[in-house]
Amino acid sequence: MVLEGAHASRLDYAGIARERAALREYLEALSRVTEAEFRAFSKAQQIAFLVNAYNAFAVEKVLARYPDIRSIRDFGRLFGNPFRDRFFRLLGRPMSLDAIEHEMLRRPGAYDEPRVHYALNCAAVGCPMLREEAYVAERLEAQLEEQAVRFLSDRTRNRVSADGRLEVSRIFEWYGEDWKRGAQGADSLERYFARYAHLLADDPALQKRVAEGRAPISFLPYDWSLNDVRR
């Protein structure tokens, strides 16, 4: 379900649970892709495949405890960590969500595409929205840019305060170096946000402050509660 002017989303986990057989069929199809087949994909196909796999397996992880779960962190941060647990197979080997994100998508020189952070959804309210369609290579550029616009337009996660401070999601702190890489990167966060100044504030004076890189940056608390439509 898309909420808040198409900038954020909640997921109907109860509805997906009723159709879990279809989800598992999709996950099994992903798991059948071999390493050799994956390597033959274009870079856009590889990114789309990995992002779709991350998002689908994250949902499957939540359903393992649903409805008795209020946050994906309920699995544990050390023991049972849902991001480090190799609870599925991908490309012929045991895989975790962290392995997809950090060892593959974020590996320097592999893709250098910071906008994947707008596409990955970790089942938390603080995450960028789960897109209402799968990512596909043919439209990946447009899909990633739309996700960027949606997330940066969401004033609950990214905004300029009345006194001119840029208050943004903590993902920009956690993955600070990623925003400097590739064609979409910039030499600083200030310069990156300057491109999207019109999304971060309505006041022209505040937009100008961001566009000129003069807005000091602070990071907002991250909401790890489950992005369940029922809540």
Image: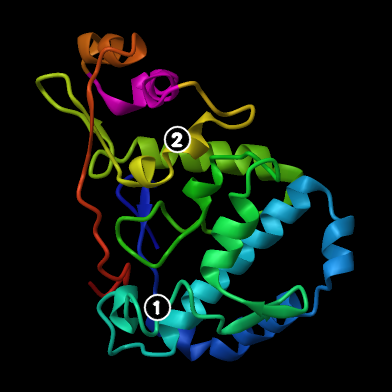
Q: Quadrant of the N terminus?
A: bottom left
Instruction: Give the spatial CA distance, label 1 vs label 2.
Output: 31 Å
User: Mark 1 — residue?
Assistant: 81
What residue type is disc 2 on?
Val
138 relative to 22 in the view: left or right: right
Quarter the C terminus occupies: bottom left
Q: Specify the principal SS of the magenta part.
A: helix
Q: Is residue 167 visible?
A: yes
Residue type at mark 1? Asn
In this rendering, the answer to whether 2 lies above or below 115 is below
Residue at the spot of label 2: 149
Across and down, in percent, residue 44 comes to 75, 46
In this rendering, position of residue 119 left or right of residue 72: right
The x, y position of residue 51, in whole percent, is 61, 59
Instruction: Tell me if 118 is positioned left or right of 28 in this view.
Output: left
**Region rendered in magenta:** 188-202
Mark 1 falls on what kind of element?
Answer: loop
Would you call the spot at circle 1 few (<14 residues within 10 Å), some (14-19), or many (20 or more)? some
Image quadrant assignment for residue 188: top left
In the rendered image of this protein, does residue 38 appear above or below residue 153? below
Q: Nearer the viewer, residue 3 or 48?
A: 48
x then y, percent, for residue 180: 52, 29
